[in-house]
Image (tube, rainbow, N blue to C red):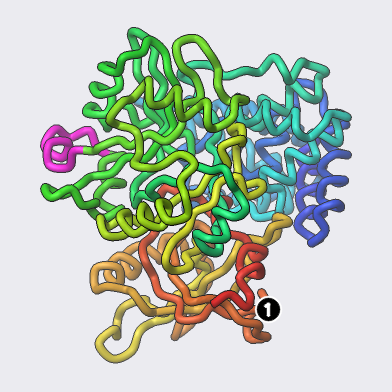
Amino acid sequence: MLTLTDVVAASAEVGGTRSRLAKVDTLGAVLRRAEPAEIAPLVGFLTGSPVQGRIGTGWRTLVAVDLPPATAPTLTVSQVDAALTALSQTAGKGSVSTRRQLLDDLFGAATEPERRFLVALLTGELRQGALEGVMLDAVAKAAGTPIAAVRRAFMLSGRLPATAVVALTGGDLAAIGLELHRPVRPMLAAPGDSLADALAQLTPCAVEYKLDGARIQVHKTPDRVTVYTRSLREITDSVPELVALVHALPCATAVLDGETLAITDDGRPRRFQDTMSRFGSTAEEQVKALMLHPFFFDCLHLDGEDLIDRPLRDRIEALRRAVGPHVIPGLVDPSAEEAEELAARALAEGHEGVMVKDLSSPYAAGRRGKAWQKVKPVHTVDLIVIGAEWGHGRRTGFLSNLHLAARDPDGGPPIMVGKTFKGLTDELLRWQTDHFPQYQVAADSWSIQLRPALVVEIALDGVQSSTRYPGGLALRFARVIRYRPDKSPTEADTLTTLQRMLGSP
């Protein structure tokens, strides 16, 4: 039987090393000790994502617990999991006092190190390094199962704890298949150096518009349509126009991957923030004011046939049958001249650039390899905001200069790579000043430090070697494009991505 202290010790050991292999060994060892009922909560604890999701208890409530810590560890993984389940299910009349008692019982039985771990876990601040990729490797090692089988099962189930349970209890990972109305983890694109390079690497390929929209995944059965974001959050009720459109498609069942965006009367894309604002609202007036338009680029299932393992060329053919005019603008196996013309047209219409995709590639979740490459006229990366400085001059009174960090590819804390105050509009300055304090972990007279929670898209002219920042490089002419509320820090670009850009024009 695993104790919470076992989890805290493993977390500390993982967080204390930069070695991916050491992290995997530590996690694999604790996973092998877990009983079947402990596996799911254990994986949730060590990846910083309890299986209950958010339990509705904030930082102030947790740190306000006024009880002495336990002198000896007694809490088990199962007891903590049961307490979190009870907290997540407590609502309605009398819930405030009930939740207070549940928290007092849990924290009163926890030692001081266990308390620190629980506070970090429940506030989303657990940064011990067990990211999904590391945990997947650990599950495969502990189960003695090929990593490819674990990754595929995770892609199709969308749930890492559930995948771990199957793998570690001797279940059949191959039996985890695509299930309609259960979202599939999305395949992601790697940055391409140039259109010419991408075409040379991926011939034969498809080239299509890279839209400045929001990723969606749509599932259709005869009597139901569901819509999910890139983080697998369901937004069906917020997008009735997309639901109606998909209902009318000439197919009985389908799983479609695509982008959606709001467009102006002349057909140009509206701001990304305008599109994202729709995902949290069901107000009829907002739906009418900001109609969303879908552009689908992949088909994972059509009329009873799963297509994930089929080459992209076949999936595009199925997509065109399924969605007709709603397919994203693009070309299959174009010449270099045709691809350049398409890229120029995409930019002229206000889009970001183009995607270049290997026509022989199956659908695989995550950003492994370069089967899909995004090519933009300027380099853009998604970085984590870990601090900000108070402005001067006309920016006095506003939080301005951002401290930017890349994700550690081995799961450690974000690694600082630069600062920028360029590209910040008055609107963004006001927003930062209003919202940053809720993420604050420390402050002095000139700056504040933030817990890693916010992702910002940064344009830059390249990177250069530098000893000024811990990442060993510095950003050249970095400027803010937008914040990415659709992305978590675990989806930010890694230091490795920036290192590959060294010497790029």
Magenta stretch, residue numbers: 281-291
Q: Quadrant of the C terminus?
A: bottom right
Residue 97 in sight here: no
Residue at 40%, 50% (x, y): give it.
210
Q: Is residue 116 left or right of residue 195?
A: right
Q: Is residue 316 left or right of residue 492?
A: left
- The answer to whether residue 191 is above or below residue 52 is below
Q: Is residue 406 left or right of residue 472?
A: left
Residue 52 in sight here: yes
Residue 91 position in % (x across, y down): 40, 27
Residue 189 position in % (x across, y down): 54, 48
Residue at 66%, 46% (x, y): give it.
368
Residue 271 picture quarter: bottom left
Residue at 57%, 27% (x, y): give it.
85
Comparing 214 with 57, the one in front is 214
Badge 1 is on which residue? 472
Residue 224 picture quarter: top left
Comparing 196 with 55, the one in front is 196
SS assignment at label 1: loop
- The answer to whether residue 120 is above or below residue 332 is below
Label 1 is placed on what type of residue? Gly
Residue 238 position in % (x across, y down): 27, 32
Q: How many marks?
A: 1
Q: Residues within 10 Å of mark 1 (few under 14, many from 20)?
A: some
Comparing 153 with 76, the one in front is 153
Residue 56 position in % (x across, y down): 45, 39
Residue at 58%, 75% (x, y): give it.
504
Comparing 383 with 165, the one in front is 383
Q: Is residue 474 left or right of residue 233?
A: right
